[in-house]
Amino acid sequence: MRIEVDTRVPYGNACDLTLTVNEDVLEVGFSPDPHGGPETLWFCFRLGCSGQSEPDLEGDDGTESHRDTTQGGWNGTVRLVLKHSHNMLGGHDPEAIRPVVRFDGGSWERLPKGTVVPLPDGRPTIIWSVETPKHTMDVAVCYPYGLSELRALVTETDAIWTADTIGVSQAARPLLRLSNSYGEEGGQRPGLYLMARQHAGETPGSWVMDGFLRAMADFGDAAPLIWAIPLANIDGIEGGDYGKDNFPYDLNRAWGRPPMRHEVSVFQRDLWRWRARCHPVLAIDFHAPGACETNGVYAYVPDPDTDRGAHEVLMPWIDWTGEALGAPYAADEFARVARYPSRWETPSFRTYLWSQLGVPCVTYETPYAQTGERVLTQDDYREIGKRIANGVMRGLDKLSSRSETRNND
């Protein structure tokens, strides 16, 4: 039987691949590949088992590795061994890393906590024992989300969402925007602008946006005008990048004037078009934090010491959405200020929106694996998005009531 580890799959990413057979255990060692960037986190690959036996081969480029096992077939177990977790962004608590797997193209499922086994020098490895697939087993740090999931969203929401190509990426891939209305010049319908996957590997952000958009579709004409970028860093997504601070420029730090990425140039023009066709009230940026964070969903807000105006305008939205999110998803410290150092000096999506368009923007960070003791599924991510959407609708109702009161006065 031939055993093969293959990264030539959608969103593939793995390196330092090793295959070792010890009695009835096949050990598959792997590490996330930085893909030329300063940080690692995302990994995704396929373990294939076929009846054909071929000579041992390990690809020089690290894209695949396979080795013969017994001629009579493989009847043992598979041991997945994650290497170098301490070098992953936020990899300080290895037991909190809970990958997902699927067998033979079936449904994804979350693995239980792994066993942390230190090497002689103290470096950790994380080990999971899983059943042997009949043919293939896909492994990823979290549930993948790409174009097929996006198509399902559009199909399953009764064509509420229109997908338009508003430009192309630096590698000439289509940049898609979803909208529930184009609005009109000078329109006064409340408007939201959404962004997800500026960092390519942060798939929880896409699942939460998915739930948000499904919930807003249920509100129908009562929903605000929404324009959404679901797969912002499409080159990184398709290429299997993690995308945090990746060179030549982190997408979320390329929002200067002029912008430092072509994608951002496309998005900036789209934002001004959106702003002219609605009454803009809020922008949302969906992200995921470090690999091991488990305290719950939280929101980054402007620093009141340096940007008090933006902070004050945004905080009511934080209250409305934080209350709607609630247990078991919201972190105890829900509103946070990012005061960690950045590799880039140029503005982020959030700072560009406020400084150039006068629109407040909140960044939601949703963990990869769990919130507290709750292990997250795709349904959980969608529920998080639904609750945030409900909080936004509550906020719009309150703003409308305040406006009516002022007009009556």
Image (tube, helix red, strand yellow):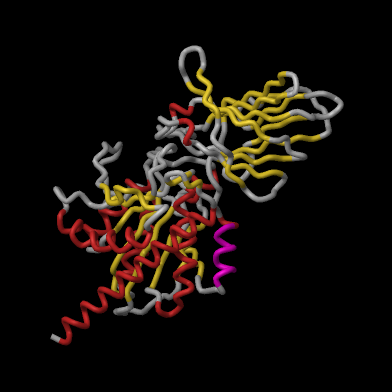
- At 40% from the left edge and 30% from the top edge, which residue is drawn? 92
- Region rendered in magenta: 149-157
Q: Is 362 one of the magenta-colored residues?
A: no
* x and y, in percent, of residue 291 in the image: 44, 38
In the image, residue 232 sits, relative to residue 118, either above or below, namely below
Q: State left or right for residue 184 relative to residue 346.
A: right
In the image, residue 83 sits, relative to residue 392, either above or below, namely above
Q: State left or right for residue 68 relative to residue 253.
A: right
Give whichever of 140, 96 is nearer the camera: 96
- At 55% from the left edge and 39% from the top edge, which residue is drawn? 99
In the image, residue 193 sits, relative to residue 237, either above or below, namely below
* x and y, in percent, of residue 265 in the image: 36, 56
* x and y, in percent, of residue 344 in the image: 29, 40
Give whichever of 124, 277 is nearer the camera: 124
Q: Please indicate, yes or no, whether residue 139 appears anywhere in the rendered image.
A: yes
Quadrant of the image containing the N terminus: top right
* x and y, in percent, of residue 379 in the image: 53, 57
Give whichever of 150, 273 is nearer the camera: 150
Quadrant of the image containing the C terminus: bottom left
Magenta region, main secondary structure: helix
